[in-house]
Image (cartoon, rainbow, N blue to C red):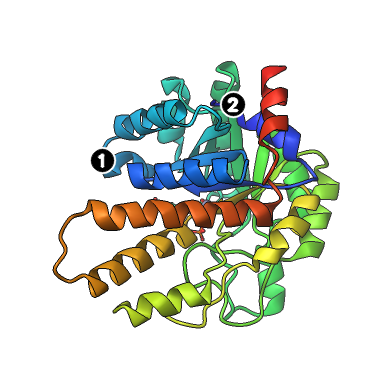
Amino acid sequence: MIVTTKTLFEHAYGKYAVGAYNINNAEQAMGLFQGSIDSQSPFIIQISKGARSYTDKRMLEAILRACDEIFPEAVFAVHLDHGDEKTAHDCIDSGFYSSVMIDASHDPFDENIAITRRVVDHAHSKGVSVEAELGMLGGVEEDIAVDEKNALLTDPNEAREFIERSGADSLACAIGTSHGAYKFSGGQGLHFERIEAIQKAIPGVPLVMHGSSSVPQDEVARINAAGGKLKEGAKGVDENQYLPAAKLGVCKVNIDTDGRLVWTRVHREFFQSKPEDFDLRSPGKVFMAEYAKFIASRSLLLGSAGQLESVRELAKSK
Ligand code: G3H
Ligand code: 13P
Ligand code: ZN
């Protein structure tokens, strides 16, 4: 059952976070749906610009419509991840997306507001909600001095003005995370005092955490033991911090890299142990089962496990 992102946020706000997972193919979709059902959790499917062009944007839409039939119990929203303005308008017009992200955070403040406002006006006229981004998410790396790091985090006063002027429904904030598998080699983690200040500045506005993969070190070690060459020792977000962040209004936790690590580990180990095999379905089956297990484990950490029935009731009452 496809629901609005707004409904998922209304149900989760201040209590738990909804996992938002990127998908590119049928195997990822099957694992995601199965793991969400196993953990009785609602979820958000994210489609990036790259995912839309990997096969064809119609392919992903067809896969998701099929999954909706294969897993009639599932409750989920469909979201454009890191959209530019053109893609955001295209997704709004498609009628398939519950929400879109317009990522204009690299533009100056006023320009970010103007671009976001245009997308918001179009989206709201079609019942679609909008996630915008404020702050330098990828820039908060360990080589930067603490003062500089704090300056790159989302400023609470700017967040208030941004939401008022742009009309965005939710806000992706720079709160100490960055994208990819090489996040922190030092002790850096989430800046809870900043999340709290942002929540106070824009109470009730769902906050979004990008770059939320935990980059499990045992996963990296297994990949490397099976022939991979990933940098070891770079930590992701402490998965035990998802729930404390959720209590401060972080409703959406974006996880992509960790899923890619599951895929890489499964395929490397599979072909290393079965070098004579060439049936793509054999590792594909293992991946779907392993990804489902991973998703169920995230639902528990996010606090979204067990919320399915109650979200469905809320969605039906709309
Ligand atoms: O934050 C971006 C997501 O990990 C999507 O990555 O643009 O390579 O599909 P992608
Ligand atoms: P990770 O790849 O670091 O998990 O980030 C995902 C993300 O933010 C998608 O928008
Ligand atoms: Zn992101």
Mark 1 residue element: loop
- The residue located at (44%, 75%) in the rendering is 220
Residue sitting at 58 percent across and 40 percent down? 43
Give the vertical position of 104 relative to 194 (above or below).
Answer: above
Q: At which x and y percent is residue 71?
A: 48, 31
Q: Nearer the viewer, residue 56 or 314?
A: 314
Decide which of 310, 114 is in the foreground and name it. Answer: 310
Label at residue 104: none
Tell me the element at label 2: loop
Left or right: where does residue 101 sit relative to residue 64?
right
In which quadrant of the rendered image does the N terminus lie?
A: top right
Query: At 31% across and 78% down in the image, what residue appears?
Result: 226
Residue lying farthest right?
A: 200
Image spot of residue 265 (x, y percent): 37, 68
Residue 147 higher or lower than 137, as above or below: below
The residue indicated by pointer 1 is 55
- Of the numbered discs 1 and 2, the one sitting upstream in the chain is 2
The CB of the residue at mark 1 lies under 8 Å from ligand 1: no
Residue drawn 57% across and 52% down? 296
Q: Image quadrant of residue 143? A: bottom right
Say which amino acid is labelled 1.
Answer: Thr
How many residues crowd mark 2 within 10 Å: few (<14), some (14–19), many (20+)?
many
Q: Nearer the viewer, residue 294 or 228?
A: 294
For residue 3, the mark is: 2
Residue 83 at least partly seen:
no
Give the side of residue 6 with respect to residue 214, left or right. Answer: right
Q: Vertical placement of 248 versus 101: above or below? A: below
